[in-house]
Image: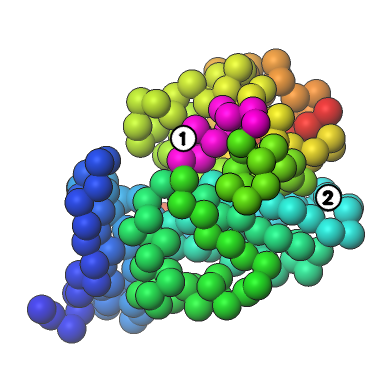
Amino acid sequence: MSVNFQELAYRSTPMGLLTLRRRKELILGMDIYEIKLDEEFLMSSVFTVAEEALAKLGLEGLSEPELDVVVGGLGLGYTAVTALEYPQVRELLVVDTMQEVIDWHQQGLLPLGEKLTSDPRCRLVHGDFFTMSASLYKGFDPEYRGRQFHAILLDVDHSPRDVLHPSHASFYQADGLRQMTAHLRPGGIFALWSNDPPDEKFHMALSEVFAHYETHVVTFPNPIQGTVEANTVYVARNI
């Protein structure tokens, strides 16, 4: 296999063929790590600004001296690592439905794996974020049923309208969001990354559940195409 391209791991999953690959981007002179599900790109290490902004925007408004945080979606780990940069984070649970992605971090196949697995505040949890969110009594922590958190940061689907699995769609409606708030402390933050522009229908769902929410358009350069890209981060505060 070419030194400029390497398939690091792959595994068949119920959702499709999951692939981890590394390729050298000659224009940028750097290695790029990518995770694909079949032919669909889930994550690229070229574009991480918005994933990092998800953690920053989600945590910057919290004043508690100690924070318990959930990240839904491990991916390449950029949201989780950014959250761990906040010293007030007491514990971080990173929930991912794909054990394969957790394994790749634990095996050191991804650049941020060591940071995540060596930080005693971070726990990687294998589970379906959406099933956990809908469970009033179990919740996100398999060791502590019904636990509430100061922040829940979600980056799984491409957007509220472009989901990886049809079963995720109900989460982005008012009833699904309301179930999720059972796992948030009073005054806690829910933040969501989206690849799409601000979504009016999702705004309506947020307004039914949260007294206050903000929508942030995060821009960043695409150095390969010489363009400027934009993602959306929604931030809502629990009553």
| Percent x, y of residue 33 | 34, 68
Q: Please, what is the dominant secondary structure of the magenta stretch?
A: helix
In-front residue for pair 141/224: 141
In-front residue for pair 218/188: 188
- What secondary structure is marked by label 1? loop
Q: Looking at the image, which residue is at 20% across and 70% down?
A: 7
Q: Which residue is mark 1?
A: 159
Tell me the quadrant of the picture where the C terminus can be found: top right
- Classify mark 2: residues with Cα within 10 Å, few (<14), some (14-19) or many (20+): some
From the viewer's perspective, is 200 left or right of 104?
right
Q: Amino acid at mark 1?
A: Ser
Is any atom of residue 49 visible in this view?
Answer: no
From the viewer's perspective, is 175 left or right of 113?
right
Q: Which residue is mark 2?
A: 62
Q: Looking at the image, which residue is at 58% across and 29% down?
A: 135
How far is mark 2 from mark 1, CA to CA? 25 Å
| Percent x, y of residue 87 | 78, 69
